[in-house]
Amino acid sequence: MGRKERIKELRRCIADLRGIRNELDEVLPSMGAAADSMISVLDDVSALQKIEAGRMTVVPRPCDLVHTLLRTTATAFRAWASGRGVDLGVMNAWSVRGA
């Protein structure tokens, strides 16, 4: 392989790496959020096992589960949507009434 062919091959490799990097920039935030969600699920399963075994007591407290779930999901998909020209966000009833 001559010098010109090696240079062309290196340029192709570098261009491929740039493409991969651009794809990773889009996907990595979602992967991090998905990993955090999976760890949270595993923590919940562990907590349920402790509750069932009588090693933990449950104290009820108010929470906004629906809004939290929607916000977390929107965060996980925001970079993906942005790459497709979509501005993804979550508004609750209070936000809409105040508009």
Image (cartoon, helix red, strand yellow):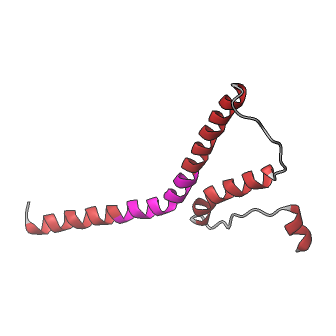
Magenta stretch, residue numbers:
18-33
Q: Residue 22, percent across and down?
A: 44, 64
Q: Front-most of 11 and 54?
A: 54
| Residue found 17% across the figure and 68% down from its top | 7
State which quadrant residue 96 falls in. Answer: bottom right
Q: Going 49% across and 57% down the picture, which residue do you hit?
A: 28
- Judge by depth and name the residue closer to the eye, 80 or 69: 69
Farthest-out residue, right? 97
Instruction: Judge left or right: residue 83 versus residue 63.
Output: left
Instruction: Tell me: 40 left or right of 89.
Output: left
Q: In the rendered view, would you say 15 is above or below 73?
A: below
Give residue 41's position: percent from left, percent from top: 63, 40
| Residue in the picture at 62% in, 44% down | 40
Q: Percent position (x, y) of residue 52?
A: 71, 26
Q: In this image, 78 relative to 11: left or right? A: right
Most extreme residue toward the left is 2
